[in-house]
Amino acid sequence: MRYFAFADREDHIRLIEDLAKASDALFIILTGIKRRAGAANSPDTALLEWDDITAEALADLDMDGRDRVIVSALEQKRFAPLIEFLKKMDSAPPVLAMMETEGKFPSAGALNISSVDLTEATGNILRREWRLIEIKRRAGELYNLLKDAGKIAILTQNDPDPDGIACGLGLQALLGRNRTTAPILTLGNVTRNENLAMIRLLKTTVRAVEPEDLREFDRIVTVDVQPHYFGPDPGFTVDAVIDHHPPGNHSEAAFSDVNIHYGATSTMVHEYLSALGVKITRRLATALLYGIMTDTMRLERGASSRDFEAFDALWPTADKDMISNMARPRLNAEELGYFVRAIKRRRLMGDFLFLWLGRIKRDDIIPRLADFSLQIGEASFTATCGVFRGELIVSFRSMDAERNAGAYASALFSKWGSAGGHHSMAKAVISLQAFKSSFGLTRLDEVREKVSRMIEDKI
Ligand SMILES: [Mn+2]
């Protein structure tokens, strides 16, 4: 392939030579300017000097559709004859015009001409570098704060989710630690099936501890969570905070990076790792990618361009089969029993479906059955209920434009606990005891009747 570069400036010769690196031949046609003595160019480059561009001179170049044309233009109108000439060719080469002025190169809608504003393009690269310096500085600060500590506690939420667990693994890699010198901890327990599957498949551990156990650690870092989450006086002091939830007050932490513009804390940790050039293994890439996927509903909810960038960077390395296995954990016999029983006893009224799971041993059954509920019969608005650890949980799903699940959840249940959500999915988690006392109910089947009746009356 031959390259023909038309330029009314000399300072892009290196850039043009770089663009044409793989070419068989490069002709640079300096147009309207003379080459300065001693101006640098590669010996392989053929340098021509034209006073202006004419059809005759262009015809002599004998260009065809297999060639490529570069235009480096200070004065765009100088190159109008070139465009006119190319437009008349049967098989014209593609043209890349580089400019430093605003606006597009006059291509008159030709499909084979593209123009680039070099100032804007360079600006984008340089702005990105500013950001990288900032991330590098922050990651370095975190590293320096923790590098000499004996044991480091990486503390996640009370029921750690994939984002929190992935950040724990990421932080271990960043600090060159393992599960002994920097374990991932929770003050609660991992209960949800997907999260247990993630821990099992990644062969990692999340240790359940009590607040007083944290005393044996020299430093405490919270990931995907902030100190205020643990209450006004949790009994321990946090040294570093990395999170993407709305910021609370934790001025005591020596390091704090809280940014709500990230869809996942995994993205922040990935940026640290990249900035400091830490090798990201297949296992770690899998964890971080899964953390981003679950927190952003596969980039559909709350994902920023940074999450997309991290996703793009992690995707080639991550184990996609393993992610499928994490995302769709199998139902065991007992869980299947819950499903079958609830579906057998379903109550379908028009397009409203009511499902009652009764007392359950794990609460992730509820959203899983709720997701499935919209596939049953004519249902377009559903309520899936269960009782878990003294709480009555009602999970709404709506495919009905007229019925806002969040509004129903909040109108019906906020009196007894937290209730709300989006149009298509919402949840109420309320005290079973408080609900019972309100209506003088004693038995669970009475509760079921009451809840079902309340929703029916409202819709
Ligand atoms: Mn998160």
Image (cartoon, rainbow, N blue to C red):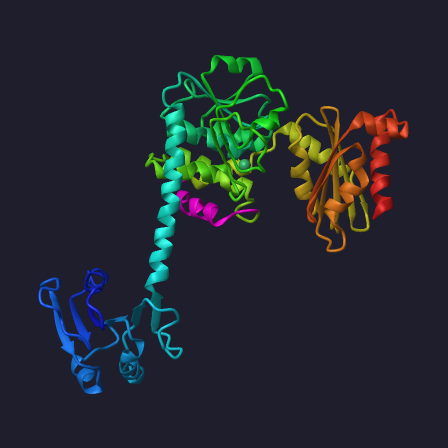
- The residue closer to the viewer here, 247 or 176, is 247
Q: Residue 380: tell me if it is visible.
A: yes
Residue at image x 50%, y 48%? 304
Is residue 119 rendered to the left or right of residue 34? right
The residue located at (52%, 16%) in the rendering is 214
Residue at 47 percent across and 16 percent down: it is 217
Residue 177 picture location, percent across and down: 38, 23
Looking at the picture, tell me which residue is in the foreground, 147 or 166. 147
Q: Quadrant of ligand 1?
A: top right
**Quadrant location of the N terminus?**
bottom left
| Depicted 67 relative to depicted 284: above or below | below
x, y (%) of residue 220? 48, 22
Give residue 433's quadrant in the image.
Answer: top right
In magenta, the rendered stretch is 302-318
Identified at 50% across, 26% down, the residue is 253
> Does residue 203 sit above or below 103 in this rendering?
above
- Asked if 448 appears above or below 40 in the picture, the reply is above
Left/right of residue 445 with respect to residue 17 in the rendered view: right
Which sits in the foreground, 285 or 305? 305
Q: Position of residue 345 (x, y in %)?
A: 79, 37
Taking the magenta stretch, the answer to whether it contains residue 309 is: yes
Residue 368 lies in quadrant: top right
Could you tell me if residue 322 is visible in this image?
no
Q: Where is residue 49 shown, x and y percent of the image?
A: 14, 76
Q: Observer-nearest residue: 19 or 442?
A: 19
